[in-house]
Structure formats: structure tokens, C-alpha cells
Image: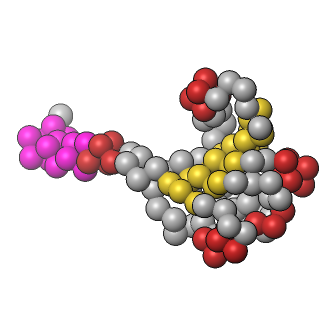
């Protein structure tokens, strides 16, 4: 089983998945935010799953390039940047992680309010 992990980050985000699915082969494909994350055709063709760790889906390939793909996962929340119509036409489910970052965002929203209320910024 081949899983394509796509990211713009320098870090390897697929470590958790590798520990859980140790019989799978993970292909990490990196790029920069100002580029398309266009993996080679052979990686696209052989991947059964794709995990997108980046903020925007810029695959650089049409859904048809992923001949064996069974699922598309966005390791964040929301579908606004996923080609839902393209994946649905191929019968490929798309999912996200709805609770991704929820507590971190809430903590960060409250922290500046407390800092301003308590006058911590002036120190």
C-alpha cells in the first residue's frame, strides 16, 4: 500500500501515520507555498491514499491521474480547497479532520484578550 503525503513544511508530518500503518509505504512530497505540489506521475498512479498537510490543495494533477486512489484526506478542517466534484466523479471519498487546531485557536484568541486586560503588554 502506497500513501502520498503532501506538505509545504520542511518537517515530515507523516510520522504518526508511519507508526500506525507500518506496513504501508509513505511517499513524502514537499514544495513551497508559491508552487504547485506536483508529484511525479508514477507516484500519483500508485498511491492508494493521499494526505494533504498543506493549507491549499495544489496537486498539479487532475483526479484521473490517481488511478488507484481510494481516499483523499485533508489533515485540517474544511473542504473549500478540495476538488470535491473531481473526486466525486471518480467515486473517491474526501474527508478532513474537523477538530484540527480547535483548542489551539481558542487558546490563542483568549490569550491576547487577557494580555490586554491585565496590561501585560506594557511590561
Q: Judge by depth and name the residue closer to the eye, 52 or 88.
A: 88
Q: Is 110 part of what is drawn in magenta?
A: yes
Q: Quadrant of residue 82?
A: bottom right
Q: Is residue 77 shown left or right of residue 48?
A: left
Q: Judge by depth and name the residue closer to the eye, 82 or 7.
A: 82
Identity of the residue drawn at 59% across and 52% down: 73
Please determine whether, in this image, residue 26 is positioned above or below residue 64.
Answer: above
The colouring scheme, among rainbow, by chain, secondary structure or one colour, is: secondary structure
Identity of the residue drawn at 15% across and 37% down: 120
Residue sticking out furthest to the right: 42
Q: Where is the C terminus found, in terms of image quarters? A: top left
Could you tell me residue 54's position as x and y percent? 60, 51
Task: Look at the image and tell me whether residue 54 can be seen.
Answer: no
Q: Is residue 106 shown left or right of residue 115?
A: right
Q: Judge by depth and name the residue closer to the eye, 11 or 69.
A: 69
Q: Is 27 part of what is drawn in magenta?
A: no
Q: Which residues are magenta?
A: 107-122
Could you tell me residue 44's position as x and y percent? 82, 53
Could you tell me residue 119's position as x and y percent? 11, 41
Identity of the residue drawn at 41% across and 53% down: 98
Could you tell me residue 96's position as x and y percent? 50, 54
- Numbered-mark total: 0
Q: Where is the N terminus found, in terms of image quarters? A: top right
Amino acid at each position: 500500500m502506497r500513501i502520498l503525503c503532501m506538505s509545504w513544511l520542511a518537517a515530515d508530518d507523516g510520522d504518526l501515520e508511519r507508526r500506525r500503518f507500518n506496513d504501508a509505504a509513505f511517499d513524502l512530497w514537499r514544495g513551497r507555498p508559491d508552487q504547485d505540489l506536483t508529484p511525479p506521475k508514477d507516484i500519483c498512479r500508485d498511491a492508494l491514499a493521499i494526505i494533504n498537510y498543506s493549507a491549499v490543495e495544489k496537486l498539479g494533477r487532475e483526479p484521473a491521474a490517481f488511478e488507484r486512489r481510494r481516499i483523499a484526506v485533508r489533515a485540517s478542517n474544511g473542504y473549500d480547497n478540495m476538488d470535491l466534484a473531481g473526486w466525486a466523479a471518480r467515486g473517491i471519498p474526501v474527508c478532513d479532520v474537523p477538530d484540527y487546531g480547535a483548542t489551539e485557536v481558542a487558546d490563542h484568541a483568549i490569550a491576547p484578550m487577557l494580555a490586554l486586560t491585565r496590561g501585560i503588554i506594557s511590561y
